[in-house]
Image (tube, rainbow, N blue to C red):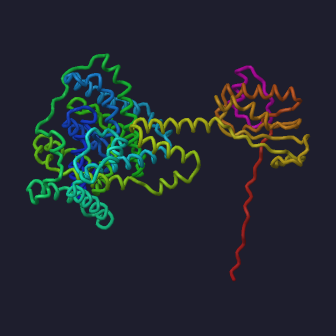
Amino acid sequence: MRTIGRPHLADFNAALLVALVGIPQCLAYAMLAGLPPMYGLVTAAIPGLIAAVLGKSPALTVGPTNTTGLVILTALIPWANQPEALLTAMATLAFLAGLSRLVIVLLKAERLFDFVPEAVMVGFATGAAVIIALMQIDELLGPPFQGVRNVVDEVRMLSHFTGSALNIPSLVLGSLALVAVVLGHKFAPRWPIPLLVLVVSMAWVWFDLADFSHAWVTVGDSSVVADGWPSFNHRLPSWHMIQTLIVPGFAVAFIGSLELIVTLRNRQEHRLLRRELGSQGCANMVGSFIGGFPASTSLTRSVLLDLGGARTRWAPFLAALMLIPIILYGAAAVRSIPLPVISGLLIATALSMLKPAAIKQMLTVNHQTRILFLVTLISTLVLTFHEAILLGSMLGIMLFLFQTSQTKLMPFVVDANGGLSTPSDRDAPSQPRLIQISGSLYFAAARQLPERLNELLSDTHHLVLDLSHAHHCRVAAVQALLAFLAECTLRGVVVEISGASAELKLLTRQMGVRLPWSEKRLAQTLITSKVSETSG
């Protein structure tokens, strides 16, 4: 920690805020994953500490998330009724998730995430913000809904909510917390408003300052919280268990990495991706030995660190460190946190995650970007997080592959002086033609080439193919050119191929193929006009 200097007061404020707000989140995410609630605090504490020490971003907090919670739940179902085996499976899954991240870093395969389009990232972040806000509404209105697993359940139960069930004190408290945080962030950004709201509300419950505070639902009313470090795994996994958990472990690492990318992009810190992936890989592997389940970047708590004014890596480190005494001795304080205040703070956090300018860009840039954004946003709302992000990523990769398979063809007419012009109805059929081929010429792109060139062939008797802007010419490209030349021979068209690379010519010799190479070059001249200015 010497490299980051002394912590600022803002780091303490942000750390305490995230630690307190993160407590009910971590408890809930552990239960969402089918595990005892206190394991959520362990996962935020130990992996959070290690990731903060090894990482670099001042506003990146690691722990349990709702995004990976359902993946973990599905992966651990086979051992759900076997307590000892469940702990072993939990530790194994965390170890494999960490190992997957380290393998990505060691192989320098983080470039895989570059294929996930910006529209998918913005759609996922927007959908996550909407879900975070919607999922807090029930706790603003009164006791939390039971059996809510996703936003669809939340909306369905809200549609049946009646005014008689409304808890006015909870609504007032949550609304005051929301307004205070939003206005404080705008007009008094240096003041730790979220932390003050949380501490004041806890003190109100703790000292029983008013009768209406009894109407507030607290963490103790919704979760079983006890002092002491929870049990952790003491058994080695079977080979069958490891085989079963390899794919879920990679899925958790992949989805968690996308959450990390969203957070880094929002903070303009994408350059730190490799460093943070490695730190989270180590954090998960260490956490697996002392009671942690798979941890990832928390979108909510990372944004909350920013809201709290975090300046250095001390902020996420202290946020994780503060959880250790709470795990050991702070059960009573945890039980006194009012859920409406947590709801107000989380809704304010969700609002800060929305990026109107980026959303507007995704909707107006082009048709494909708009489709990617809307598909990811809608699927985030109606599917599980991992299904939504994987669907958006797959769609983005499919569009990328489709675009790269469409080599660009530009036809020209060649005049008597060698000048080029765009084809028109006035051109003589006998005039020579030139087709410039731009882009990749492998696999699908090459296989489509003969048919697309035939469509541009017209009635000319002399054709030049310019390959100076073509690249990745492989065996498929040579075969495509041979097929087109055979068609031209049948139609009596003389073809020359110019601008071929030395690699392509070598490849044809190795294949024992002769192509009609030409030394002609397509010359282009950049003309600039100078405007003389006279002073009047």
Q: Residue 209 lies in what quarter of the image?
A: bottom left
Question: In this view of the protein, can residue 123 be seen by the observer?
Answer: yes
Closer to the camera in the image, 81 or 121: 81
Was residue 503 drawn as part of the magenta stretch in this picture?
yes
- The location of residue 317, given as percent across then percent down, is 24, 46
Closer to the camera in the image, 480 or 168: 168
Q: Number of numbered discs present?
A: 0
Pick out the residue farthest to the left.
207
Above or below residue 87? Residue 348 is: below
- The location of residue 357, given as percent across then percent down, is 47, 57
Above or below residue 59? Residue 94 is: above
Tell whether 360 sits left or right of 32.
right
Question: In this view of the protein, can residue 314 be seen by the observer?
Answer: no
At 31% from the left and 53% from the top, the residue drawn is 347
Q: Residue 163 lies in what quarter of the image?
A: bottom left
Above or below residue 2? Residue 83 is: above
Pick out the residue farthest to the top.
239
Tell whether 521 sits left or right of 357.
right
Closer to the camera in the image, 270 or 512: 270
At 36% from the left and 38% from the top, the residue drawn is 256
Q: Residue 453 lies in what quarter of the image?
A: top right
- The location of residue 120, given as percent across then percent down, is 48, 43
The C terminus, quarter of image: bottom right
Above or below residue 53? Residue 288 is: above
Closer to the camera in the image, 436 or 166: 166
Tell whether 244 sits left or right of 167.
right
The span shown in magenta is 498-518
- The location of residue 157, given as percent across then percent down, is 32, 44
